[in-house]
Image (spheres, helix red, strand yellow):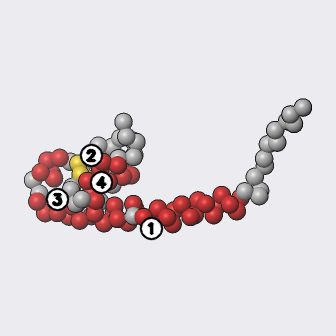
Amino acid sequence: METYGLTLVEAMACGTPVVASRVGGVPEAAPNGQGAILAVMKLRNSPQLREVLREAGREIVCARNSLSAFSIAFEGVYRESASSGGNAQRKQSAPIV
């Protein structure tokens, strides 16, 4: 079981409208109405809605999953870790005798 919904992200990146359910990380990976929808019949009956979701899906994937977005997020985590490193209490192991 995939916890994030990478398959959905990949589909949206390709411009494929996504129909998903609210389980695990799926709602975060494929937000309802933003590249994904939870109502199958509504999507099936509306070519216009499929096009809107196709475009929205591509945009959200590019914004959230681009290399630059990941780089910025990792840089923030790294900076936070580095700045709090001096303040963290470290356990010292017992000397080996």
Q: Position of residue 35 (x, y in %)?
A: 27, 58
Disc 4 from disc 2: Cα separation:
13 Å
Relative depth, front residue between 44 and 18: 18
Secondary structure category for the residue under label 4: helix
Residue drawn at x 25%, y 53% as measured from the top left: 11
Q: Residues within 10 Å of mark 1 (few under 14, many from 20)?
A: few
Among the two numbered marks 1 and 4 on one chain, the one whose residue lies closer to the N terminus: 4
**Residue 35 at least partly seen:** no
Among the two numbered marks 1 and 2 on one chain, the one whose residue lies closer to the N terminus: 2
Going by the numbered disc 4, the residue's amino acid type is Glu
Residue under numbered circle 2: 20
Disc 4 from disc 3: Cα separation:
16 Å
Q: Residues within 10 Å of mark 4 (few under 14, many from 20)?
A: some
Going by the numbered disc 3, the residue's amino acid type is Arg
- Point out the frontmost of discs 1 and 2: 1
Secondary structure category for the residue under label 3: helix
Among the two numbered marks 2 and 3 on one chain, the one whose residue lies closer to the N terminus: 2
Relative depth, front residue between 42 and 15: 15
Among the two numbered marks 4 and 2 on one chain, the one whose residue lies closer to the N terminus: 4
Secondary structure category for the residue under label 1: helix
Q: Residues within 10 Å of mark 2 (few under 14, many from 20)?
A: some
Residue under numbered circle 4: 10
Residue 33 against residue 97 in the figure, above or below: below
- Residue 81 has which mark? none
Going by the numbered disc 2, the residue's amino acid type is Ala
**Residue 58 at least partly seen:** yes
